[in-house]
Amino acid sequence: MTIEALLVYGFIVGFAVGFAVADRKLGCVVLLAVPVAMIAYVSWWQGQNPDKIRSTSGLDFVFGPLWPSLGAIGGIFLAWAFRKQR
């Protein structure tokens, strides 16, 4: 997946969570599912593709969750801003 796709997917999840959860603390806790899911995906992908493992593949566990998490933060704040307007 590209960085742009991860940002968009994270934004969509964050936007949905922002509209579904009104409480800000609970919304942030729910968003913890984004990096956890990405770590699980990276682990699964590396297990399915052992021939594509490189010396820097361990960094996927650090930087893989970064991009969807950034998108999710932007999405949740935008959803809360829309929600506040109503």
Image (cartoon, rainbow, N blue to C red):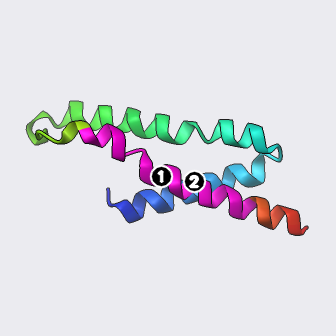
Rendered location of residue 29, percent (x, y): 67, 36
Taking 1 as reference, is 59 above or below it? Answer: above
| Quarter of the figure that contains the C terminus | bottom right
Q: Please indicate whether residue 76 sits to the left or right of residue 85 in the image.
A: left
For label 1, count other residues whose C-alpha is less than 10 Å away and answer few (under 14), some (14-19) or many (20+).
many
Q: Please indicate whether residue 67 sits to the left or right of residue 2 in the image.
A: right
Q: Front-most of 74 and 33? A: 74
| Extreme residue in the left direction | 51
Q: Secondary structure at mark 2?
A: helix
Distance from the alpha carbon under mark 1 to that under mark 2: 6 Å
Residue 68 is marked as 1
Q: Secondary structure at mark 1?
A: helix
User: Which residue occupies 77% across, 59% down?
Assistant: 80
For label 2, count other residues whose C-alpha is less than 10 Å away and answer few (under 14), some (14-19) or many (20+).
many
User: Which residue occupies 61% across, 60% down?
Assistant: 74
Residue 45 is marked as none
Q: Which amino acid, by three-letter code, is at mark 2?
A: Ala
User: Which residue occupies 75% across, 37% down?
Assistant: 26
- The rendered magenta stretch, by its main secondary structure, is classed as helix
Rendered location of residue 63, percent (x, y): 35, 46
Rendered location of residue 7, percent (x, y): 46, 60
Range of residues picked out in magenta: 59-79
For residue 50, what is the image quadrant? top left
How many numbered marks appear?
2
| Quarter of the figure that contains the N terminus | bottom left
Q: Please indicate whether residue 5 sits to the left or right of residue 10 in the image.
A: left
Q: Are marks 1 and 2 in contact (CB under 8 Å)?
A: yes
Q: Is residue 68 magenta?
A: yes
For residue 67, what is the image quadrant? bottom left
Residue labelled with disc 2: 72
